[in-house]
Amino acid sequence: MNELELACGSFRTLLEEQLQRIEHMGQPAVDYTAKERVTIGIAQGDGIGTIIVPQAVRVLEALLRDEIQAGTVALLEIPGLTIENRLALGQSVPEESLRAIKSCDVLLKGPTTTPMGGKMESANVTLRRELDLYANVRPVTIPEEGVDWMFYRENTEGEYVLGSRGVTLPGMAVDFKVTTDLGTRRIAKAAFDYARNNGKNRVSIVTKANIMKKTDGKFAQICREVAQDYPEITVDDYYVDIMAANLVNPAIRSQFQVLVMPNLYGDILTDEAAQLQGGVGTAGSANIGSRYAMFEAIHGSAPRMIEEGLGDYANPQSILKALAMLLRHICRTAAAEKLEGALAACTVPVTGDTSGVTCREYTDALLTLL
Ligand code: IPM
Ligand code: MG
């Protein structure tokens, strides 16, 4: 068989797999108020993950001490998610780790390194797919400017789900992007529900539907259809390039409230937004599905900080904000509010280098404010 036929064959397989994926969407969501015991998986990950996650666990143990003692909340250390182990096994998420994660309800996860090039998929992408974590929810606030954004990034489709499945032919490479009706409907519904339940009256749809006519065209159109069930909410459409500009335009940026978008645009815009808030070390991220949910720092494993010997100065705020989102998700609202209050009140400077305090010193200060 020649290379062209092989490529066409693998494209066919992709299409068949994606059609099958659609059939498994649409499970009912877990009701945490009705659960006798909630198991929280803890995965440190790589690089600064091994520094920030243990500090987040100290905070978690302080906040839920009574529940952990009573057994209504259990913490489970997830083995095997280091880059060394993943490379040795050639698996982005080793089977043993995935099994342990699936025995939990929710996961607090540190950043995991993804080698550039090569075949290995990002552990995040694998977990988002395996656990069907379709909504990537990322809040960004700049209180002094009245900015209060909530990003709803589609998390299981777009360029990501097939990002390691492209084809190469002599002299060229092709990747694939997929958008499904059900996948779009559920992220749109999550964004509009959030708006409705949190007193927001505007949702902005962000795509590049003028260029990616099939996939982004579908995304925008389905978001519009879902919007019809929320007549009290104003809906508008933006292309991602102008939205990137709008987010840095102080004259208008505080007008945006909830933003819903396909995967890759959400990846880029949420780093931009986090930087405006004070840096990628300051933003939390929730990955929500019907059955499972994963909470993580928005940033990566920062190998450069480790190489420069600055790992101890890593900023734990992002993972701590993710922890607050985790607590809210499992309906431990009082604990979440306590943590959010302490994060807002803790002013010791953590700068990511020796000009500030260490990750542990920051956490020590925060613990006194709980
Ligand atoms: C994020 C990260 C991930 C992504 C990486 C680690 C795969 O940048 O969560 O935004 O691109 O989604
Ligand atoms: Mg990103």
Image (cartoon, helix red, strand yellow):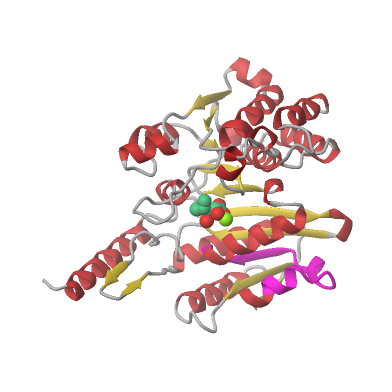
Quadrant of the picture in which ligand 2 is shown? bottom right
Residue at image coords 59%, 75%:
224
Residue at image coords 62%, 74%:
240
Residue 195 is one of the magenta-drawn residues: no
Residue toward you, 281 or 104:
281
Q: Horizontal and vertical percent for residue 130?
A: 40, 47
Task: Please say if 310 is above or below 173.
Answer: above
Q: Which span is picked out in magenta? A: 243-263
Most extreme residue toward the left, as rendered?
1
* Quadrant assignment, res 364: top right
Quarter of the picture containing the N terminus is bottom left
Q: Can residue 239 be seen at all in this image of the molecule?
A: no
Answer left or right for 142 relative to 178.
Answer: right
Q: Horizontal and vertical percent for residue 86?
A: 38, 39
Task: Please say if 46 is above or below 271.
Answer: above
Residue at image coords 57%, 60%:
267
